[in-house]
Image (cartoon, rainbow, N blue to C red):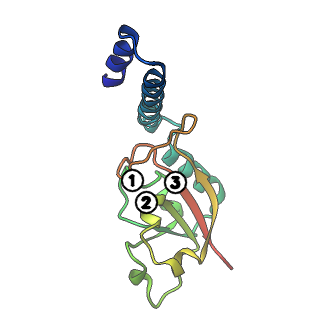
């Protein structure tokens, strides 16, 4: 709403050319970022959500009985709704939770959770598939706590 009001003000007042250009650029950037958040909210509610796409990929490509790690307790914001009866789940929040055991072969994670783990654990995995949130031009979601349609990775432990 503020961007729309500012755009209306821009057309109503005669500004010096440079000021007008700078305000137009700021409004375009604000509008694009607002559009990105709205598009990700829209996608989160449908079949094009990153969570849904990741779940479909896991169901089609990860073998039945495989061990899949989740970086936090399953919740709608950070966990793909894949078939729980097909996989063995390992849920952990830190690298210490896996001490003394082999890490899961597969990992499904939103990038904000993955970044918080120990670098030596991260290096043991390679990204097989990434499901990206919506972007418009240069604008992408910047808020780590914005869970609607957040980026989702499927990783596999390196041999």
| Residue closest to the far top | 12
The disc at residue 64 is: none
Q: CA distance from mark 1 to mark 2?
A: 6 Å
Upstream in sequence: badge 3 or badge 2 = 2
Q: Residue at x 46, y 78 (%)?
A: 118
* Residue located beneath label 3 in the image: 152
Upstream in sequence: badge 1 or badge 2 = 2
* Residue located beneath label 1 in the image: 144
Q: Position of residue 155 (x, y in %)?
A: 59, 65
Q: Nearer the viewer, residue 24 or 78?
A: 24
| Residue closest to the far bottom | 100
Mark 1 residue element: loop
Judge depth for marks 3 and 1 and give the one in front. Answer: 1
Mark 3 residue element: strand
Q: Residue at x 52, y 54 (%)?
A: 152
Q: CA distance from mark 3 to mark 1?
A: 13 Å
CB atoms of marks 1 and 2 within 8 Å: yes
User: Within 10 angstroms of label 1, few (less than 14), some, or many (20 or more) residues?
Assistant: few
Q: Nearer the viewer, residue 31 or 78?
A: 31
Q: Residue at x 44, y 88 (%)?
A: 99
Q: Which quarter shows the C terminus?
A: bottom right
* Residue located beneath label 2 in the image: 112
Q: Position of residue 116 (x, y in %)?
A: 42, 69
């Amino acid at each position: 709403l503020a961007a729309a009001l500012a755009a209306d003000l821009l057309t109503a007042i005669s500004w010096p050319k440079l000021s007008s250009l700078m305000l137009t650029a700021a409004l375009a950037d604000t509008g694009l970022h607002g559009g990105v958040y709205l598009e990700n909210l829209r996608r989160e509610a449908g079949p094009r959500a990153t969570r849904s796409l990741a779940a479909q990929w896991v169901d089609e490509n990860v073998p039945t009985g495989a061990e899949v790690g989740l970086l936090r307790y399953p919740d709608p914001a950070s966990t793909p709704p894949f078939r729980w009866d097909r996989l063995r789940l390992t849920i952990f929040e830190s690298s210490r939770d896996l001490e003394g055991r082999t890490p899961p072969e597969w990992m499904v994670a939103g990038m904000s959770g993955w970044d918080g783990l120990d670098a030596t654990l991260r290096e043991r995995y390679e990204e097989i598939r990434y499901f990206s949130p919506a972007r418009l031009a240069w604008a992408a979601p910047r808020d780590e706590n914005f869970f609607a349609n957040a980026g989702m990775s499927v990783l596999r432990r390196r041999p």
